[in-house]
Image (cartoon, grey):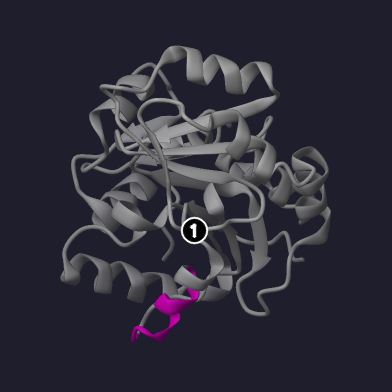
Amino acid sequence: MSSGYSLILATDLDGTFLGGSDGDRAEFYDYLQRHRDRVLLVFVTGRDLDLVRQLYDEAGFPTPDYIIGDVGTSVTCGKTFQPLAEVQGWISDIWQNANDLVKALLNGEPGLSLQPIEPRYRVSYYYDPEVLQPSTLKKLDEAGFDAVLSADRFLDVMPKGVSKGPTLLKTLAALNLDLNNAVVAGDTLNDLSLFETGLKGVAVGNAEPKLIDRLRDMSNVYLSQKPGAAGIWEGLNYHSKTLS
């Protein structure tokens, strides 16, 4: 893997890379395509691989070099869809096929309902913020799991210490890339760990208020006023990472 990239863009998809107007997205995607040989593009998303692959059919959509999916619990090459073994093995070793254990642990907990998906290295729920009990989150922590909440709707039970940010850092290290060239972008609380890496960051203008509240004192994060793709571009300019 070449370490000569001028920009490593690690971005969330929904609301971020896919956010904003059609015109803003088209302009930003074209900009990335014109400089594609100098950009390492990493999608860091809650989507699974199949949902990401559906985007490839859209005209002008940039193909990522890597996909960190399932809220940080899967890592694949964006062209071959093969796992990045070094990082995927780390995730697998922590999780230890805990899906059934988690479901049994949370059975009957108030405010939770399983999402109709079966990711391999996490268990995904819908949650009601008015009903979910702090004791439920404590139970998960004591059992050795992390909980990632976002959008006042989604709760993902994760391998301890695994989320978007740590998985991104593991990926960049495995590829021997220069962190100084990396910029992360996101819009919801499940992107918080991206910003907690200390890498240059951009919270787009449509970011959820709970995320913004957590980011206000982070000097590495630019709070854009523009939504979606336009916000990412504005943030790249702020961090002096635009290409010409």
Q: In the image, 240: left or right of 206?
A: right
The residue identified by callout 1 is 117
Q: Front-most of 35 and 62?
A: 62
In the rendered image, which quarter contains the C terminus? bottom left
Q: In the image, 185: left or right of 84?
A: left
In the rendered image, which quarter contains the N terminus? bottom right
Residue drawn at x 42%, y 32% as measured from the top left: 149
Disc 1 residue type (three-letter): Ile
In this rendering, the answer to whether 82 lies above or below 100 is below
Q: Front-most of 43 and 132?
A: 132
Q: Residues within 10 Å of mark 1 (few under 14, many from 20)?
A: few
Residue 18: x %, y % from top left: 31, 62
Residue 85: x %, y % from top left: 81, 60
Queried whether the magenta region covers residue 145, the answer comes back as no
Residue 17: x %, y % from top left: 35, 59
The rendered magenta stretch, by its main secondary structure, is classed as helix
- Residue 116 found in image quarter: bottom left
Q: How many numbered marks, from 0 up? A: 1
- Residue range (magenta): 52-59
In this rendering, the answer to whether 3 lies above or below 208 is below
Q: Front-most of 70 and 29?
A: 70
Residue drawn at x 49%, y 19% as measured from the top left: 136
Q: In the image, 160: left or right of 136?
A: right
Q: In the image, 12: left or right of 152?
A: right
Residue drawn at x 60%, y 45% as measured from the top left: 122
Name of the residue lying farthest toward the front = 108
Residue 101: x %, y % from top left: 69, 37
Residue at disc 1, secondary structure = loop
